Amino acid sequence: MAEQSQASGSKKIWGLHPNVFFTGITSLLTDVSSEMIFNLIPLYLTNVLLAPVSIVGLVGGIAEGADAIFRMFSGWLSDKLGKRKVLAVAGYSISTAAKPFLYLASTWGGVLAVRFADRLGKGVRSSSRDALIADSVSSDERGRAFGLHRAMDTTGALLGLVITVLVVWFVLGAGTKDLTIGVFKSLVWWAVIPGVLAVILMQIFVYDVKPKTANGAAARFPLSGVKGAFKKRFWVVLVILAVFNLGSMPANYFVILRAQDLGAPLFQVLLMLLLFNAIYALAAMPMGILSDKLGRRRVLALGWFIYALVYVGFALSSTVWQVWVAFGFLGIYASIVEGVSRAFVADMAPAEMRGTAYGLYYSVVGISVLLGGILGGVVWDAIGPAATFYLGAGLAALALLGILTLIKEKE
C-alpha cells in the first residue's frame, strides 16, 4: 500500500491506527507458530539430545543476542530509507522459513543454527516494526498502542501453548516428565502454517506512515550522527537496561528447567507457561495505559521490583506449587515491562530517528541477554539452580536502583 501521513485520517480500530491492530495480528500469528516449538527447546536439548544446562544457556543466549547487530542495522536502515514495512515483512519471512529445519536438527549445533536464523529474522523486523507502530500514533497513545501490541503478541503465545498442551496431553499423557522427539517434530510441521499466514497478513494490510519530524528534519540521518541525535538520558537508560537484561536470562529457558528440576511433569510445565502468558496478555494493555498516565519510569521500576522478588522466589522454591506462584507473578512483570520499555524508547527519540533508537535498544538488550544466558548456564552447572536466580534478582535490583536515582520521570 502507499505511504500515508500520520494524520491522514485512517479509520481507527479499537481507537488506534489500523497499523497497530494488524501488526498485532501479525505478531499473534507468529507467536502461535513460535510458542508451539521454541518453549520446548530447553527440554528438547536436555531430554532428547542430553545436553547440559550450560549448552542450553549458550543456545538461548546466542539465539537472543545474535540478532543485536541486525536490529541496529535494520532500525537505522528504516530511518534512512523512510520505509519500515519492507524490513518488517522480510524479517517475519526469514523466521518462518527457518522453522521447518528444526525437523532435521539432531544435535545442539543444529538447534543453535535454526534459532540463530529465527532470531536473525526477528532482528531484521523488530526495530522497523516498533518504529512503524510509534510513527502511527501520537505520543499520548504510545503506552496504549504498545500495550495492545504486546497483548495480541502474547495472546498468540497463549494459543500456541494451548496447541502444544493438547498435543502433549493426547500423545504423551499428563504424567510424562520428558519430551519425546516424535512430539517435537510433529509440532514443528504444524507451526509453519500460522507463520506463513502472518507474513501474508503483514504484506496486505500494513503500510508505511510518514512521521512528523521536528522542525521539518529529513528522515535520513547517517549512522555517524547517532551520538548527537539522542540526549544523555537515552544513553543512561540503555546502560541501565543492559544491567537488568544481563540477569533476565534468555526466553524463560531457566525458569522452564527450574520447574522440571523440581519434579514438574512436561504437561504441568506447559500449563505454567499458559498461566504466564494469560496474565501477560490480560494485563499488558492496562499497564501500557497506566504508563501513559503515571509515566514510564515509575511503571518500569515497579516491573523490575516484581521481577527481583520473583527470581528470589524461583531460587527459594522447593515444591512445584511454589513455582506455579512464581510463574504467575512473572506474567505480571512481563505485562508491565515489555510494552512500557518500548514506549519509553519512543518517548526519548526524535521521530526521524526512531528506527535507529529501537535498533540501539534491541542491540543492548540482545548482547546483554547473550552474556546473561552464557553466565546463567555456567553458574547453574557450577553452583546450582538457585545461584542463577539469585544472580538475576541481584542485577534487577541494581537496575532498579539506577533508574530511581539516575533518571527523572520527565526531562
Image (cartoon, rainbow, N blue to C red):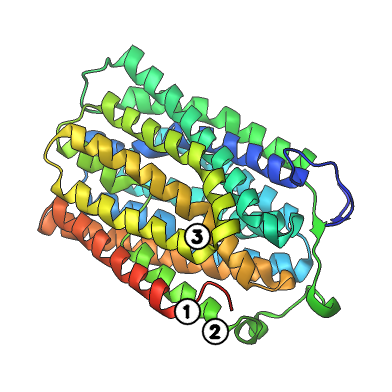
Q: CA separation, marks 2 and 3?
A: 25 Å
Crowding at label 2, few (<14), some or many (≥20) Cα neighbours within 10 Å? Answer: few
At label 2, the amino acid type is Lys
Residue 13 placement (x, y as % from top left): 76, 38
Residue 51's quadrant in the figure? top left
Pick whichever of labels 2 and 3 is earlier in the sequence.
Answer: 3
Q: Which residue is mark 3?
A: 67
Disc 1 secondary structure class: helix
Q: Residue at x 59, y 55 (%)?
A: 126
Residue occupying the point 37% across, 59% down: 304
* Callouts 1 and 2 close, C-beta under 8 Å: yes
Q: Give the mark count.
A: 3
Identify the mark at residue 253; answer none if there is no mark: none
Dot label at residue 232: 2
- Mark-to-mark CA distance, 1 and 3: 22 Å
Q: Residues within 10 Å of mark 1 (few under 14, many from 20)?
A: some
Residue 339 at what x, y percent from top left?
54, 53
**Side of 261 where 137 appears, left or right:** right
Q: Nearer the viewer, mark 2 or mark 3?
A: 2
Q: x%, y% of residue 303?
A: 40, 56
Mark 1 to mark 2 CA distance (whole Å) = 6 Å
Task: Give the mark toward the camera: 1 or 3.
Answer: 1
In the visual, does 340 lie left or right of 142? left
Rendered-image quadrant of the C terminus: bottom right
Residue 104 vs residue 221, the one in the foreground: 221
